[in-house]
Image (cartoon, rainbow, N blue to C red):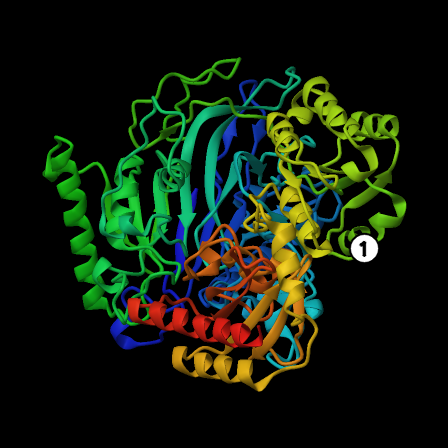
Amino acid sequence: MKIQIYGCRGSIPRPNPEMARYGGNTPCIEVVSSPRQCDCVDGDDLGHLGHRIILDLGSGAVDLGTKVMGEMFQAKKRQQAEKKEVANEGGGESSSKNTPTGVTFAKGEEKEEPKKNDAVVTRKFGGTILLTHTHWDHIQGLPFFVPLYLPQFEWTIYGPRGIAKSLQEILSGQMQHDYFPVRLGDMASNTKYQGLCEDMEKGFWINGDVSTDCDHSTSSIKVTSKYLNHSVLTLGYKLEEFAQIPLPSSSQQHFRRKKRGVSMAYITDHEPFDHALANGGFTPRDPRKPNCTADQYHAQFFEDVDVLVHDCQYLFSEYAPGSPASKEYWGHSTVEYVVEVAFYANVKQLLLFHHDPQRNDDQMDEVLLYARELAEKLEEKCGGDKENVRLKVDAAKEGDTYDLDPYAFLDENDVSVDGDVAESKRDSIRHVDDDISPPRSVNTGQQCVLLGFYESASGPIRDMLESTANSPKVEVLQSRDELLRFAKQNHPSVIVLDNRLFGCTGFEFCKVIRTEMGEWGKNVPMLVIACPGEGQRARLTAERLSIDDFIQGPYSPSYLFTRIQVSLLRMPLRWRRAPLPENESERLDTLKSTGLLDSLPEERFDRITRLAKAMFKVPISLVSLVDEDRQWFKSNQGLPGAAETPRDSAFCAHAILTDDIMVVPDALQDDRFADNPLVEGSPNIRFYAGCPIKVACKDESSKMPIGTLCVIDSKPRDLSEDERRALKDFGAMVEQELANDG
């Protein structure tokens, strides 16, 4: 595995002479699998061609594209020479062993020795592209990556699989006519797009090229992925390459893949889950305890890798939580955090990456020295010698290369007929404890959603699911026996049952799935829509059966659609519907008694929201009333034309559950709201603060929360104590106006 850096700058390209040593291009790394050839035991020569993998397509991809084009032209010249040799000399051995890195054979073709007057075998060029996410600095090189424009190339582009848009749709956005003269569809290469989810265990094998005498893929690189903590859906990748030992031609298998190899992890655009760890203090997971923190889980992903490329954009002094110039919530790591997690994860070499665009070469030198000092202190803290630090720390530089050879521990005496290999004595080679599964490709088959619904009620959600990119198959059934039969035969990806159709037998169906259908039945996501009146007992039953979501009360098609989509992606749903208050019936009666719902705008309320909008310097201020299945705006500053939203997407439905004000500094970091359509789409809520509005109930025995006075911003922020008191004052002004009506 050869790693070469083509771009390591974060956020924006910096063609600055003061940044020339480390480079100004945004992220792009080339990884090429080992081209080493291993002689088969019985003497056959099974060559292995290196496969090219590209990590991100920032501005560094422009230079990489130039290199790839040069290799293609060289290979073309070599092919022409081979043809001439075949024509003039009437045969001879092919020089395909010398084919440059990145050359692949067309799918289904065999590598054969040229015969007299035969054309030299046609080769395809290309490889695999792994995108961490689609922020501009990670894809801005795509329109300028020349190999995507030529039909001689074949590429597979992987990236995070979104909820609403396909990867191809997202990438085409920066190439729309308003921004770029060429569209994504005009690229002539044979390019496939594939969305990925988190998969830290099985992963997938990069499709190897048919470079042997058989139809057996010689893929040796395994890819696993993990979600990172960033402002958009972002994946980190781990690449592991394993030595492959050819077996005798009499064997049913062509290769034995060894349980040891070399590895690298690529983690960019990631912020500590626990922001307090930005200044250090990380502790490794205690193996005696079953649970771990999100940051320990993060470190576990790249445990023992040979090379870790990790976002280190800030120092803690720059991250500076609470300061006016704070970089908190910007989605990036600090040097202090990364050195610690890398050290405790037993990483062999750390490459500081995603350099701050304002940091020049001399400042980068200082950051690197500081990072090495931190590693030395950790070594001393653990009883080691600071002169012999286990963690080697470097900073990524454009043009730097790193070679990791999975065959380094082999010699001609190590290989036996059954593929066993003597124990390695080289510390630089990673040992993998888990069994290596056979090569498998990414599952691109169509997913299936099974709905146990009344046919008339299934229309809206069915239409939403079938209108998405990579739409799943949707099967709607009403009979319990039909549902069980379909589930057993087809193993759907998600099951959704409406207990209004099935009653108590819905839980019986779930029990059969969980207990009688093997591993699939134990793990398949199941969502159950509650019957009216089903209470705590039904919820406890749902928990006992590991129902993923027991949906009580009114819900919108948008909520159910998102819930199904994240289940298909095997992602946790980061959108929680507010539970109903215990006194919901009385609260609704109180709200309706005010006569405010669906009434005309009134200046007395608009005056308050205008003042709140100006004082808090926010684009939106509302008086929102929380009805049975909606929130309705009595006063609306900043959302022109909007009168209401579904209740299950209303922040205010959560705010009425508390006696104090509710503040959400950053909705993307809050599991109650991150997947909410009001966060993912317009008005793109990041900050919310709401003060409950209470009025006396009919008998005046108590006050009921009927809605909120709230302020909203599309940027993350927080409120000072003075601002919190001021928001309460505005809420009291609304309550006073309502009291005057009485």
Q: Please, is residue 509 above or below residue 350 in the view?
A: above
* Quadrant that contains the C terminus: bottom right
Q: Which residue lies furthest to the top in this view?
A: 417
Residue 737 image position (x, y, % from top left): 52, 77
> Viewed as shown, does residue 462 lie left or right of 534?
right
Residue 712 image position (x, y, % from top left): 49, 71
- Return the residue at label 1: 460
Q: Observer-nearest residue: 582 or 373?
A: 582
Q: Observer-nearest residue: 511 or 299?
A: 511
- Image quarter of residue 489: top right
Q: Residues within 10 Å of mark 1 (few under 14, many from 20)?
A: few
Q: Observer-nearest residue: 301 or 223?
A: 301
Residue 69 image position (x, y, % from top left): 55, 63
Q: Is mark 1 on a helix, strand or loop?
A: helix
> Viewed as shown, does residue 674 lie left or right of 264?
right
Residue 285 image position (x, y, % from top left): 32, 31
Residue 207 seen in the figure: yes
- Image quarter of residue 288: top left
* Quadrant that contains the N terminus: top left
Amino acid carrying mark 1 in the image? Pro
Residue 162 seen in the figure: no
Label count reads 1
Q: Which residue is drawn at 52% across and 49% down?
A: 53
Q: Please, is residue 689 above or below residue 349 in the view?
A: below
> Viewed as shown, does residue 319 lie left or right of 612?
left
